[in-house]
Image: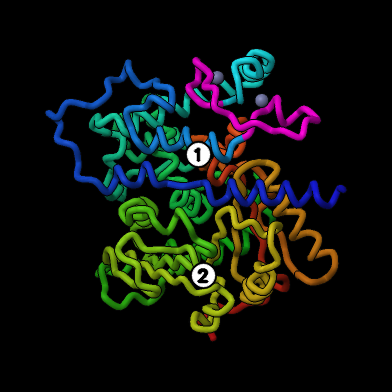
Amino acid sequence: MLFSARNDFNTHLNHIRTYISLKSTFSRQNSPKPISTAKPILSQDNLFHPLSKSPFEDLRHRYKQICVYGSCPVCLSQDNEVKNKPKYECPDCGYPTHCSLEHYLQDKEKHKNLGTCSMLKQSNEDEHDLRSGRTMIELDFPSSQPLDEQVNMLNWDLYFYTRGFPSMDNDRSVRHVSKLLTYPITIASILHEYGPYTIKNRLTDEGLKSLTALRTILYPKVISHDIKSQNPKEIIRIFVLGARAESLLPLHIYSQLSYLFPFTYFHIYFIGPESLPSINNTSHKHTNYAPQLSFTWSTTFYHDYHDSLTPFDPYTDVFFLFSPGISQTNTWHDTMIKLLQTKCAIFITGFDQEDLHSEVNAIEEKSEKGEYELDWLLRPGENVFKSMKREIDLKDVRVGVWANWGIFGIRGKKYDVVHEDDR
Ligand SMILES: [Zn+2]
Ligand SMILES: [Zn+2]
């Protein structure tokens, strides 16, 4: 009994994992910039619409999806065999939350008091705002940082302010922008010398060792005069495993990582069957996007791709796994063994507290059994640069998660590595 409940829970989590999607924001990004004189389809005081009556087809489609895949919380809580699908739309949040007016009224107090209604209303207005046709100046990201101006990486607000982001003075803009930037800026916040994680704040001694190794390359003592060199001596390789939404982001979003390290060459690898370049659909793709930033996409499973990436070097190589679902399937096992053998730092995120805990538990279990030999680099906890926008679970609209809500870091044990260059 316990086991099957656990399985249901897993299926549920997997569903959410694939649901963290960037489609809506992303398609806006790809469409030609709206001409500023064009009249928005929706004005700012007209962003709330019941999903079934939304002026946008994809949001009406979302209503239909919830009607098919969703659940009525009152029906769920009853012993009845019949579980009706939600089709009654709450007038205050515009989401189909219950199967009938009767069940809605029965549950209305919970729906309001537990924060579900306000979360869904915010999501409703955010989604309509994204499609409203207004000029989204907050998506006009700043370019490179003047060398004499220090960036503060302690939180989103300070980051936006010190990087000179335009018009980030309201929470909605922060939600839109953080959803896009959570991937590159989570990476940057770990690597950056003024990032939020220190020995006093979740970073372990081993973690500091790993980051110090990487930072000797990220912050070179001698800066080459020709920084745009065609043949850089050292390249920081960032491997994003099991990549999904993050591989589809417009590439300029990743420039925001690059701008924070003006003397560094980055090569970002998106690896995994769902890692699709925004350029086209070939199975293997490479691009030199900017002089200091290149990308490779591979739809190969990581454990089959690993050997072509050797040798690994903890001074230049780092792994990021965004909400990988390690605890959900056994398919990660071989990959984890290979990653730990590299002795490179590995950072893993989860989309809420529960998800993060199950990832940590899965790793600790294997570690206690002696299957994984690892050191902790960053203790599990909330990610300062999580997405501030909640993603609503269409199977149960009471659940809203954040991309990269939490983060932790590990590394294969026995830290006796030598930088490739010194061999
Ligand atoms: Zn019901
Ligand atoms: Zn409501």
Q: 163 or 382, which is in the foreground? A: 382
Q: Main secondary structure of the magenta part?
A: loop
Is residue 84 in view? yes
Residue at the limit of the structure toward the front, as seen here: 82
Which element is circle 2 on?
Answer: strand
- Mark 1 vs ligand 2: CB below 8 Å: no
Q: Of the residues shown, which amino acid type is indicated by label 1?
A: Gln
Residue at 60 percent across and 65 percent down: it is: 345
Crowding near the residue tagged with mark 1, few <14, some 14–19, many ≥20 C-alpha atoms within 10 Å: few
Residue at image mark 1: 65
Q: Is residue 234 left or right of residue 409?
A: left
Q: Is residue 359 left or right of residue 94?
A: right
Residue stretch in magenta: 71-96
Is residue 216 in view? no
306 over 252 or under it: above or below? below
Q: 345 or 98, which is in the foreground? A: 98
Position of residue 370 measured from the top left corner of the image (x, y, whole percent): 83, 71
Report the disc number at residue 317.
Answer: 2
The mark nearer the N terminus, 1 or 2, is 1
Q: Is residue 58 left or right of residue 378?
A: left
